């Protein structure tokens, strides 16, 4: 009898699949959004939702539960990395820690840096304390991976005021909707102006008739 066959397998062994899900989740918590394929995003999304729901109750038991599902690791070390361009050392999701909180040893390895589990408990979970689920969104792009043409999507934590315009460009349906809304508003304004002009003309004609009588 086959066991543990529920859900998508993605043609991966169990250990490989578990490691991939954990790495995607850690990357999302650190950066706020990640780019991946649609099947992977759908697989990791419920895992992330459960982690955030668990982290809302901040306690020692919660910390141990998170550690059992997501190994702790150092995060935000790229802030102090000289090889990372300055243009990439920004985040619209978190207030990044200071460079002084990150230290490297003489071999270039990270010696001191913020920890992932602490980041989830103190910054990610409090952000959704008044939200009962639905902490992530999947945004489809007009973009495909070179080689197998797999659709690439953006898995993003909700709460970003920029909405779905992640890449700075509006989607086709959004453009069409905006044009229709603008056209409808223009027509309503023209009709209202016409009615106001007709009323004003009627009033002026009534006044002129009253004066002539």
Image (tube, rainbow, N blue to C red):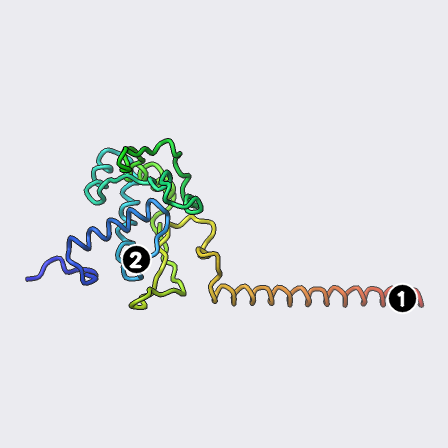
Screen quadrant of the C terminus: bottom right
Q: Secondary structure at mark 1?
A: helix
Residue at 27% over, 48% down: 50
From the top left corner, tell me how far across and down residue 2 is, in percent.
8, 61
| 136 left or right of 20 in image | right
Can you tell which quarter of the image residue 99 is in? top left
Q: Residue furthest front?
A: 106
Residue at 15% over, 53% down: 15
> Crowding at label 2, few (<14), some or many (≥20) Cα neighbours within 10 Å?
many
Can you tell which quarter of the image residue 145 is in? bottom left
Can you tell which quarter of the image residue 41 is in? bottom left
Residues at marks 2 and 1, CA–CA distance in whole angstroms: 72 Å
Q: Secondary structure at mark 2?
A: helix
Q: How many marks?
A: 2
From the top left corner, tell me how far across and down residue 162 is, in percent.
47, 52
| 170 left or right of 82 in image | right
| Position of 54 relative to 182 (above/below) | above
Closest to the observer, 58 or 69? 69
Q: Which mark is residue 41?
A: 2
Residue at 32% over, 33% down: 103
Report which residue position mark 1 lands on.
208
Screen quadrant of the N terminus: bottom left
Residue at 31% over, 62% down: 38
From the top left corner, tell me how far across and down residue 84 is, in percent.
38, 45
From the top left corner, tell me how far across and down residue 185 is, in percent.
62, 64
Q: Earlier in the sequence, mark 2 or mark 1?
A: 2
| 162 left or right of 110 in image | right
> Crowding at label 1, few (<14), some or many (≥20) Cα neighbours within 10 Å?
few
Closest to the observer, 83 or 6? 83
């Amino acid at each position: 009898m086959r066991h543990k066959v529920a859900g998508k397998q993605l043609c991966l062994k169990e250990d490989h699949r578990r490691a991939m899900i954990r790495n995607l989740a850690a990357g999302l918590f650190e950066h706020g959004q990640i780019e991946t394929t649609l099947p992977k995003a759908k697989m990791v999304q419920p895992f992330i939702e459960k982690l955030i729901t668990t982290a809302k109750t901040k306690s020692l038991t919660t910390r141990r539960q998170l550690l059992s599902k997501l190994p702790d690791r150092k995060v935000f070390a790229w802030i102090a990395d000289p090889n990372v361009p300055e243009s990439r050392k920004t985040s619209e999701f978190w207030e990044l820690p200071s460079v002084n909180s990150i230290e490297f040893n003489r071999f270039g390895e990270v010696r001191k840096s913020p920890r992932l589990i602490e980041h989830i408990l103190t910054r990610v979970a409090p952000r959704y304390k008044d939200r009962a689920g639905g902490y992530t969104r999947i945004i489809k792009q007009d973009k495909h991976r070179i080689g197998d043409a797999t659709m690439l999507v953006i898995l993003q934590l909700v709460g970003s005021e920029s909405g779905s315009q992640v890449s700075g460009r509006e989607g086709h349906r959004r453009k069409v909707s905006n044009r229709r809304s603008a056209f409808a508003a223009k027509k309503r304004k023209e009709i209202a102006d016409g009615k106001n002009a007709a009323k004003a003309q009627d009033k002026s004609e009534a006044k002129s008739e009253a004066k002539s009588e």
